[in-house]
Amino acid sequence: MKFTILLAMTAFGLTGSVASANQEAALVRHWYQQYLHRDAEPCGLNSWVSVMRCKGPVAVQVGILGSEEYYLAHGCSPEGFVAGLYADILGRTACPSEIYGWVCQLGRCGCHATLAQNFLCAAQAELAQRAMTAPPIDYPPTPAFPPQTYNGGYRPSVYQSPSAYRAFR
């Protein structure tokens, strides 16, 4: 039965759109958790998935971050709003000068959604810079082995000269 349904969905070209819809919904759910720290309600989920299809993922992020709910959840103040953007998008605490700069920009534009969009653009640059300057993977140190012996003496390593090896032959 499952095979028949899958075959019918493939024949009508529905598998790609169903998978795409599931991915879009999963992404919106992720943003609800990341930004609003709660699960998406069905109505909101469907609404944001529609926005994503029409305007793209950035429009959804801007809409969620610029919402009254996000502003209220972060202290109902411009400073709290900006600090929330740093914590939720960049995963770090903002220094006072960073908060001040974005609060001034919010005062000029007067719109949380506009500031959220500008912040997302700036955050992309910071995240890209972080990825380029990521420290190398820290491998565990090589365990120290006791020296190997050769004919009762120290066995020379491969890094020693050939003459050191001949001395032990």
Image (spheres, helix red, strand yellow):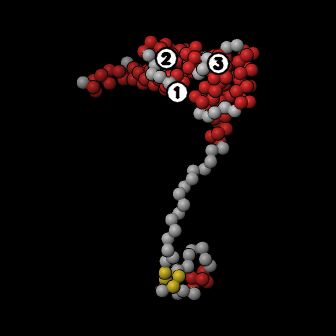
Disc 1 on helix, strand or loop?
helix
Looking at this view, name the residue that lies furthest to the left.
1
Whether residues under marks 3 and 1 lie with C-beta atoms below 8 angstroms apart, the answer is no
Q: Tell me the amino acid under the disc marked 1.
A: Gln
Q: Where is residue 18 in the image (x, y as percent from the top left)?
A: 41, 21
Which of the 4 image quadrants contains residue 11?
top left
Q: Assess disc 2: are there few (<14), some (14-19) or many (≥20) residues with their C-alpha within 10 Å of its C-alpha.
A: many
Residue beneath label 2, please?
49
Residue 6: image quadrant is: top left
Q: Which amino acid does label 2 sit on?
A: Val
Apparent side of residue 102 relative to residue 149 in the rendered image (left or right): right
Q: From the image, which quarter does the N terminus lie in? A: top left
Q: Residue at x 58, y 28 (%)?
A: 88
Residue 47 appearing in the image: yes
Looking at the rendered structure, the secondary structure element under dot 2 is helix
Q: Which of marks 2 and 1 is nearer the N terminus?
A: 1
Q: State which quadrant residue 96 falls in.
A: top right
Secondary element at tag 3 = loop
Nearer the observer: mark 3 or 2; the answer is 3
What percent of the width, then of the height, locates residue 27?
49, 25
Nearer the observer: mark 3 or 1; the answer is 3
Residue under pointer 3 = 77
Marker disc for residue 74: none
**Which residue position holds label 1?**
34
The first of marks 3 and 2 along the sequence is 2
* 130 and 76: which is toward the camera: 76
Q: Distance between the residues labelled 3 and 1?
A: 20 Å
Under mark 3, the amino acid is Ser
